[in-house]
Image (tube, rainbow, N blue to C red):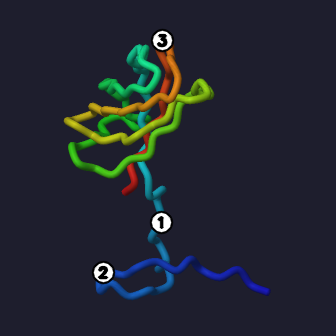
Amino acid sequence: MAARKPIVIGADGLPQQLQAGDTISGPHAFFTGSANLPAITLLIGNGTSTFAVTPRVTGDVLVAGEPIVVSPGVALPAGLNIAYAIVTGQNTVQIAFSAAVAITVSSVAWTVVALR
């Protein structure tokens, strides 16, 4: 069985085979950053952390309102939850947290993926 060419969405919005000479680049852009988590000392509390990110590809920019997914570099403590993550400005991300228990955590490295 011969390999088939990938199916892509054409300029007209319809599926078509990838044309000779065309390439597919990854659909997502990766950024990294480190954030100090808020000290959530109430039994049930919440907080936010805003931090700058660095693109994996030089010159790439994360813009306000762009959809993202965030992933911590280490496991978060039990009871600490990510409520939301948004891009608030150029290469700036805000993550909101909620906790069901008292949490004291310092800095965590994050991978941020822009869904493009």
- How crowded pointer 3 is (Cα within 10 Å; few <14, some 14-19, many 20+) is rated as few
Which marked residue is nearer to the observer: mark 1 or mark 2? 2
Q: Position of residue 72 (x, y in %)?
A: 53, 31
Local secondary structure at mark 2: loop
Residue 92 figure quarter: top left
Q: Relative to the observer, which residue lies in front, 46 or 22?
A: 46
Mark 1 / mark 3, whichever is N-terminal: 1
User: Do residues under tags 2 and 3 come within 8 Å of each other at their CB atoms?
Assistant: no
- How crowded pointer 2 is (Cα within 10 Å; few <14, some 14-19, many 20+) is rated as few
User: Do residues under tags 1 and 2 come within 8 Å of each other at their CB atoms?
Assistant: no
Q: Relative to the observer, which residue lies in front, 66 or 15?
A: 66
Give the number of the disc on residue 103.
none
- Alpha carbons under labels 2 and 3: distance apart: 47 Å
Q: Amino acid at mark 3?
A: Ser
Give the number of the disc on residue 106.
3
Give the number of the disc on residue 11.
2
